[in-house]
Image (cartoon, rainbow, N blue to C red):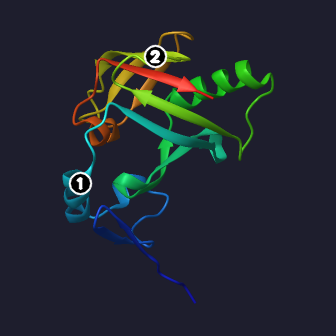
Amino acid sequence: MTTTTTITTNNTEATSDEVKLGGWWALPKEVQEQVLACIPDQDEWKFTATRVSDGAWSIDVPEAQTFGELLVGGTNVALDMHFLNMQMAPAVDGDTVELTVSRKPLDEMTTFFSKIRPDPLWEGSNFYTDGVLHQECWLCPFVQVLWGDAPDTIYIHIA
């Protein structure tokens, strides 16, 4: 027997069946539109990133009714390298880090991503370079859910 839970954020509802490990992309279009109308306009977001199978990392963004949004395409590699530098041990599935991402400079920064080019294959996606590691990182259009656009620079603190 499967139990369905209703998740309410900013007066918008979705069922747990709709909010699976598909992240934002699993939400029905009408729910995405409702959520976008309620996303707070803020420069800075804080997440817990969890390393999951296949070397990816995932984040939950309850304000966007998004759970298990995957960080892949080089972003996962950059997180692995930053984790190794901080912990002096490689990341394994289940490890977590606290991420602060901002479109404005942070007082305490681990790195920053600089936009280098749009992804011609997936509209709204962009390639960035990690300013410390010089690792190319791909970010999907979900960045636009947070900020309405894809900033030229994203400032990042990892703890």
Q: Position of residue 44 (x, y in %)?
A: 38, 32
Q: Are marks 2 and 1 in contact (CB under 8 Å)?
A: no
* Residue placed furthest toward the front: 107
Q: What's the amino acid at mark 2?
A: Phe
Image quarter in which the N terminus is found: bottom right
From the viewer's perspective, is residue 146 above or below residue 149?
below
User: Of residues 9 and 28, which is closer to you in this image?
Assistant: 9
Q: What's the amino acid at mark 1?
A: Cys
Q: Position of residue 146 (x, y in %)?
A: 31, 40
39 left or right, relative to 63:
left
Q: Residue at x 23, y 54 (%)?
A: 38
Q: Position of residue 127 (x, y in %)?
A: 37, 22
From the viewer's perspective, is residue 156 above or below residue 114?
below
Res 128 → quadrant: top left
Question: Where does label 2 land, which residue?
Answer: 112
User: Of residues 42 and 21, which is closer to you in this image?
Assistant: 42
Q: SS class of the residue under badge 1?
A: helix
Q: Which mark is residue 38?
A: 1
